[in-house]
Image (cartoon, helix red, strand yellow):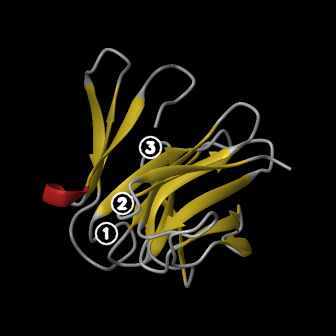
Amino acid sequence: SFLPNGDFYVSDGYGNSRVIQYTRNGEYVRRWGRKGTGDGEFDLVHDVVAGPDGRVYVADRTNERIQVFDRQGKFLAAWSGLGAPWGLAFAEKEKALYMCDGKNNRVVKVGLDGKVLGTLGSFGKGPGRFDFAHHMAIDSEGALYVVEIKNWRVQKFAAR
């Protein structure tokens, strides 16, 4: 995930359970996190998104929560009860976060207070259904693109 100045965050989850920040030139800035279940600890960091609100949202996949930090890595909040976050995307126009819940085969729209605003999809092969929704992106028009593992496809959902 990129910051306005070109710096970026990397989810280093499979080997190290941490988030790493680099400059736009690839120079190391900082890292935070370690394996665990406490605040600021992770069990498989699967995605990281820097929101325009100055907060950094981390998909803590196996702990089934989204953790929220400031841009320097200071822990702010943990949101649980949303499902298992595999992928995240920030919807600037909606001031909301979208989350791929791969475990439950759905997309969850989350407010910036951590509350569920809505869900999309369920298990299946047809349009609007998912089989391991894994990652997502939102384009400049607000359309949502969801990538699935087992259905081998990308589905596009138009902005409303």
Element class at badge 3:
loop
150 vs 25, nearest the viewer:
150
Asked whether the beta carbons under mark 2 and mark 3 sit within 8 Å of each other, the answer is no
Q: Nearer the viewer, mark 1 or mark 2?
A: 2
In the rendered image, is residue 45 in sight?
yes
- Name the mark on residue 129: none
Q: Residue furthest top?
A: 25
* Lower sequence index among marks 2 and 3: 3
Q: Nearer the viewer, mark 3 or mark 1?
A: 1
In the rendered image, is residue 70 in sight?
no
Q: Quadrant of residue 86?
A: bottom left
Q: Residue furthest bottom?
A: 81
Left or right? Give the position of 40 relative to 143: left
Q: Which residue is mark 2?
A: 149
- In this picture, is 134 found above or below 49? below
- Name the mark on residue 72: 3
- Name the amino acid, label 2: Ile
The image position of residue 50, as x and y in percent, is 53, 42
The image position of residue 119, as x and y in percent, is 69, 73
Left or right? Give the position of 63 relative to 36: right
Element class at badge 2:
loop
Q: Nearer the viewer, mark 2 or mark 3?
A: 2
The image position of residue 155, as x and y in percent, is 57, 51
* Lower sequence index among marks 1 and 2: 1
Asked whether the beta carbons under mark 3 and mark 1 sit within 8 Å of each other, the answer is no
The image position of residue 52, as x and y in percent, is 66, 38
Residue at image coords 36%, 78%? 63
- Name the amino acid, label 3: Gln
157 vs 127, nearest the viewer:
127
- In this picture, is 49 found above or below 96? above
- In this picture, is 135 found above or below 2? below
